[in-house]
Amino acid sequence: MKICWSSNGRLRTKYLLNFKKISARIPNSIISQRKKHVEVFSEGDYIRKLIVQNTEISDNHMTPELKLHLITPKCKLWWSKGDNSPFCDPYWAFYWSGGQVISRYILDHPSQFLDKCVLDVGAGCGASAIAAAKTGAKTAISNDVDEVAGIAAKMNAKLNDVSVQIDTCNLIGQTGRGWDVVLLGDMFYDASFADTVIQWVTTLMKNNTEILIGDPGRLPLLTHPVKNTLTKVAEYKLPYELARENNGFTTGTVWTIKR
């Protein structure tokens, strides 16, 4: 059974039967039936249980100050085929290089985020929002349209004893929300999506919002016209294992956009 979220946020399970996927919507609760025996779980509790079962709590990354529920080589899912995963796409269980370097930068420069309202877009595991909360941000928001990612981020915030707001709405395109800093880690993986993101943050900058981009050097960012307006604020060498997992990228850079 795979746990997914449809575009309108309602839980969906996918069953594999005779190699065919059959979709069924489950309103309000997940029900497991075995003849007359019925077990009822809240959706959130069930997903939290799955996350605990399929990840490990790890600090083996560039921000050992943070403990995160991640899929690592010690987890069965690391070695399993996609069809064996209970989640449709558990990208939130991996700590991507762009997110790692932004989080490292935040922890290395706490005064830059003190008393600020910080929005982490495409947050995944929520590490960068958690890092901002640890440094004293007034508000740290972990934003990801995948509600399973939102549950994972909330679990990670609790694990690190910080308060992080979870937002699963699509905030790209929204303005006037009072964000002082917007974090974009690993968001430039597609050229057309890069255009959408850049148009949005260009508007945000008119309201003096600071934009920080974390990326290991993906082409959609390096070949985008915005590259000429980027200022490098930090560069980090990626650990060997992280570099190997990220197509051989050896460094990760934190950029800001010139005003």
Image (cartoon, grey):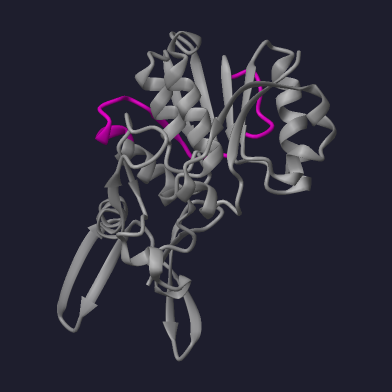
Q: Residue furthest bottom?
A: 18
- Residue 179 visible (yes or no): no
**x then y, percent, for residue 79:** 39, 69
Closer to the camera in the image, 166 or 42? 166
**x then y, percent, for residue 139:** 43, 18
Q: Residue at x 74, y 39 (%)?
A: 221
**x then y, percent, for residue 65:** 32, 29
Residue 161's quadrant in the figure? top left
- Residue 78 visible (yes or no): yes
**x then y, percent, for residue 132:** 43, 21
Q: Is residue 172 magenta?
A: yes
Closer to the camera in the image, 38 or 135? 135
Q: Which residues are magenta?
A: 157-177
Residue 41's quadrant in the figure? bottom left
Quarter the C terminus occupies? top right
Q: Is residue 102 above or below residue 192?
A: above
Q: Residue at x 38, y 21 (%)?
A: 133
Q: Is residue 233 above or below residue 152?
A: above
Q: Seen in the image, is 89 located left or right of residue 221?
A: left
Q: Is residue 202 above or below residue 68?
A: above
Q: Is residue 135 magenta?
A: no
Q: Residue furthest left?
A: 37
Q: Seen in the image, is 30 located left or right of residue 98?
A: left
Quarter the N terminus occupies? bottom left
Closer to the camera in the image, 132 or 167? 132
Q: Residue at x 52, y 58 (%)?
A: 6
Numbered marks: total: 0
Q: Residue at x 44, y 50 (%)?
A: 94
Q: Seen in the image, is 252 located left or right of residue 129?
A: right
Q: Seen in the image, is 22 located left or right of residue 220?
A: left
